[in-house]
Amino acid sequence: MALFGTRVPLTALFGAAVMALFILLAIFGPWITPYPPDATVGKTWTGPSAEFWLGTDNIGRDILSRIIAGAQTTIGIALVTTVLSFTLGVSAGIFASVGGQWLDNLMSRVVDMFLSVPVLIMALIVLTALGSSIPTLILTIAFLDSTRVFLVARAVAVDVAARDFLDVARLRGERMPWIMFHEILPNAMPPLISEFGLRFCFNFLYVASLSFLGLGVQPPQADWGGMVRENGQAIAFGILAPIWPALAIALVTVAVNLVVDWLLSRNVKPSGASAEL
Amino acid sequence: MSDGNILEIRNLRIEALSGQVLVDDVSLELRRGEVLGLIGESGAGKSTIALAAMGYARAGCRIAGGEIRIDGTDLRGIGPEGRQGYRGMRIAYVAQSAAASFNPAMRLIDQICESPLRHRQMTRAEAEARAIELLGKLGLPEPAKLARKYPHEVSGGQLQRAMAAMAVIGRPDILVFDEPTTALDVTTQLEVLALIKQIIRDLHTAALYITHDLAVVAQVADRIMVLRGGKMVELGDAEQILGTPEQPYTAALVAERDHSRPLMSALPRDPGPPVLEAVGVDAGYGGGKVLSQVSFRLHRGETLAVVGESGSGKSTLAKVVTGLLPQMAGELRLDGRPLAPGYRQRDADVLRRIQLVHQLPDMSLNPQHRLAKIIGRPLALYSGASGAVLQRRIADLLDLVGLPADFADRFPPQLSGGQKQRVAIARALAAEPEIIICDEPTSALDQLIADDILKLLMRLQGDLGLSYLFITHDLGIVRRIAHNTLVLLKGETIALGPTAEVFAEPMHPYTRRLLVSVPEMRKGWLEEVMA
């Protein structure tokens, strides 16, 4: 299949299809769940059947309904987090590239400090101290993740900022916001778009991991990480209950990565030589 | 195949993967010991043909048809390993930018010896001894010491010679020179050119010499092939091509290289007070002084050329005048009033009156902005125009620089080099400036296109009364457009005055060296200068 004048590989198409499926589930979830996601509707840990396609969980709730409802929570939180983290990280990264050496050094060293502590550990400390709620969860992960985004955005922006049109803009008397968002940002977009996909995967896994550890989304609200935790012991009895949410997590991560891989390969396509001719 | 031909190319056709034809039905032959010059503008297919002579096509291209015979063997018929055996051994390549072609992480000696070791021609000790001997022959000081250096530790001219050593170490029958002196200063170009000529004579190799500069090719080539748009225009002896060209295109190329016709209009006898004046300006980076005690005056409608080798402080002077680099000492005056040292301290009207046109439009135009935004932004900022008025003024400016009005919707990457430079000029004009600082605006362009840009600048000067501070290393240009000239050597003023006087006797030795280094389009010039 061709898009933007290039062939889209099958892997990217598969990734895009899976993403589209889960996004549709997240949007229309409340209307299509076969059972209320929080209600006990059967026995504990029954296997897949015509009545409950994926079986029931530790307190007899329908797993399919909870996975559909959990799509909204888990994907929604990861998406909002990534958007926030990008807004913060990209603005700061571009600002560092044009704000002068002193400011660049200060910001980079502060970011280095945050980079030296794993996100998950830091998030655990903050969420334990402040208590877990969805806004706290989003803000905490978004801030920690923005330090990673900062690194990429700054590296790309420094390269753009060295070009002559920045001097032209400065000599025209342009102010900082114009220079950052009109001159630099459009030139930094291609690598940042692929980075967005990667950071989304990480944030998605952080949300799931924190919920699995009991510090993310709180029960009874359905989310995939929490579902793995609630049904974790079932695995010892050979029951499939925890496999389904884990599979959903894996599917979304793989799908986003397949699409990102394609985007990245488009960015590095050799065009210089033929462009010169 | 006749006996004397070491290289024969028959009906060569090269296509881009998109199907575009890059080289169309080109045939040539090269006798042993003969130098064939390939000349043409960028996009003419010169480099593509030269690479094809080694059986190689760049990424995104393929050799679609024809024969490439070295000593009778068709390179297209012997497979990748077979071709590998020819490259470096029988045919070797010298690229335009040595700085970009050397691996920065390897010592020079290891890169020079790579080919003979790879082809098992010599042992490492033999190869290294030969490499050092070659570097010495190429006039490099302390070759044994230099060979152990990394590429960034030596100068551009030295690197270009090291590259020549790399090419000749395997004693190839054919050398391919792809614009080997284009990236060098005139004075360095002279030395490298003389060395190339000596190599060809001493080793009695055949060579393909690619350049866009007819004066350069006149010094080295026995025969010249003129190319345009991937097709051959004319092929003949060097004397015939330069003296009595048959094709109109060749005639135009030869005529444009003629430096005698001045393009500028005369200055009034009393030019009035200077628009821009510099008094005893010192400037530099982080403590190091690059410019010292530079003074000049620029009048309305005047072009002041600033010339010198790279490192002479020409571009630093442009930065000081624009305010990007505040001076350490001295003063700049605009219409008699002192200019604040840094651009941040200058008010919008002062910024408007001094505009800058850079050397590389690829770097100076934001590739993500449409021309309407590139030109419209300064218009809107300075004149407050908007809506239909703004659109009309953008169209007017495009027209003024000779571009169609519908270009407003295009992005810079969709334009050619000359068109991009016109956009950069239109952007400067949008501010309705009094002074335009031109920082080598034509040095990245082909001759005919560079000439069009110069004519455009001269026309605008006449129509709008602009003053130019024109930075260049090309003395041919200086004599055609500059009323006055400032010669810089390591940041010191060597000469300042009317161009004709600066280049008349008695001259400073440095000015003379710059002047005689400008290649002239006749055979034997190189020998005269080097003698």
Image (cartoon, coloured by chain):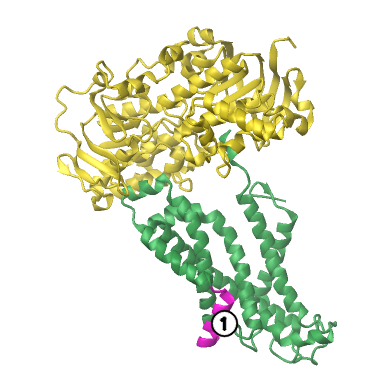
Chain colours: A green, B yellow
Percent position of residue B522, x then y: 45, 11
Percent position of residue B350, x then y: 23, 46
Query: Which of B202 and B462 lies nearest the eye of the viewer?
Result: B202
Percent position of residue A129, x then y: 51, 87
Q: In this rendering, is residue A44 above or below B258? A: below
Position of B494 compared to B185: left or right?
left
Position of B166 compared to A168: left or right?
right
Percent position of residue A275, x then y: 58, 38
Position of B428 compared to A118: left or right?
left
Q: Residue A229's image quarter?
A: bottom right
Magenta region's main secondary structure?
A: helix
Which quadrant is the C terminus of chain B positioned in?
Answer: top left
Q: Residue at x 50, y 14 (%)?
A: B218
Which quadrant is the N terminus of chain B positioned in?
Answer: top right
What subunit carries mark 1? A
Please state the extent of the stretch shown in magenta in the rendering.
Answer: A117-132
Q: Secondary structure at mark 1?
A: helix
Is residue A238 one of those drawn in magenta? no
Q: Judge whether residue B433 can be spotted in this image.
A: no
Q: Residue at x 60, y 83 (%)?
A: A216
For the residue marked with disc 1, what is the amino acid? Leu
Q: Residue B401's image quarter?
A: top left
The residue identified by callout 1 is: A124
Query: Which of B443 and A19 lies nearest the eye of the viewer?
Result: B443
Q: Residue at x 84, y 82 (%)?
A: A48
Number of residues whose C-alpha sits closer than 10 Å to that of mark 1, classed few (under 14), some (14–19) or many (20 or more): some
